Image (tube, rainbow, N blue to C red):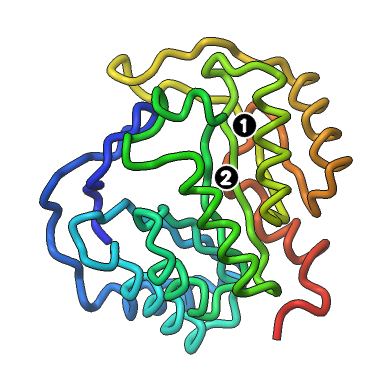
Amino acid sequence: MGDQCTRGCHFCAVKTSRTPKPLDPNEPEHVAQAIAKWGLDYVVLTSVDRDDLPDGGALHFAETVRTLRKRSKALVECLTGDFQGKLTDVHTVAESGLHVYAHNVETVEELTPQVRDSRATYKQSLSVLEYVKKAFPSVITKSSIMLGFGETDAQIHQTLHDLRGVGVDCVTLGQYMRPTKRHKKVSEYVRPEKFEEWRGVGERMGFAYVASGPLVRSSYKAGEFYIKNLLANRVQ
């Protein structure tokens, strides 16, 4: 949906604009053609936030998934924004035929105002993930947390608890890396053994999959974990 985001999160270096360029109506077909040509078996689709559009781009997102599914047998994960908490738009994407619905809370609730755009609230993100799991139980839900903003252990534990509480199946934890000097400073470089500790905590909470490490990102080994651990009896 373009390279200009309508939001300005303090951790992200994507270009921002109040009036991004219009959507490319041919994008769904072009994306599907490219992925089919590459022969991928797992693909993660993500986008900028488009708060300028009535549906936040949900229909465009969904059409891309549907077109892709017609051309390719690839498993599809969609990493979406929160669509301003409009669950009808969340529903549009969730019913498109995707296999994994991902939406990142990014950080703990207490630091959300310092890390994310003011339009992206912690509870709003939880509501997106909760809705998808309740409305589409067979869809895998996933979220991601960055560490290093100054969060406490208790806050991280609560965040994991909250995610599991709304039925999130998979979670990743990684180190925040400051993209430019204009962005939020790194408060701490978390040691690998601490990430390993959080992996154990998440697994004990009941997450189906936890990836936790300094270099882990939202789409870390997406295909491998999904295919090996969650695919059986879930994909129609």
Q: Quadrant of the C terminus?
A: bottom right
**Image side of residue 190 versus residue 16, left or right:** right
Circle 2 SS class: loop
Q: Residue at x 49, y 48 (%)?
A: 125
| Distance CA(mark 2)–CA(mark 1) | 8 Å
Q: Nearer the viewer, residue 100 or 91?
A: 91
Q: Is residue 73 above or below residue 83?
A: below
Residue 165 placed where, x, y %? 71, 49
The residue positioned farthest toward the right in the image shown: 204
What residue is drawn where x is 72% and y is 34%?
A: 212
Please tell me the numbered disc located at residue 174.
1
Residue drawn at 28 percent across, 73 percent down: 27
Question: Residue 134: horizontal and vertical position, in percent?
Answer: 64, 68
**Few, some or many C-alpha atoms within 10 Å of disc 2 (few <14, some 14-19, many ≥20)?**
many
Amino acid type of the residue tagged 2 in the rendering:
Ser
Mark 1 crowdedness (10 Å alpha carbons): few <14, some 14-19, many ≥20: many
Residue 16 badge: none
Q: Residue at horizontal 27%, vertical 41%?
A: 7
Residue identified by numbered label 2: 218
Q: Are marks 2 and 1 in contact (CB under 8 Å)?
A: yes
Q: Helix or strand or loop: what does disc 1 sit on?
A: strand
Residue 119 x/y as whole percent? 32, 41
Q: Closer to the camera, 138 or 232?
A: 138
Give the x, y percent position of residue 105: 53, 41
Q: Is residue 31 above or below residue 131?
A: below
Q: Amino acid at mark 1?
A: Gly
Q: Is residue 167 left or right of residue 215?
A: right
Quarter of image, res 225:
bottom right
Q: Earlier in the sequence, mark 2 or mark 1?
A: 1
- As drawn, is 181 to the left or to the right of 32? left
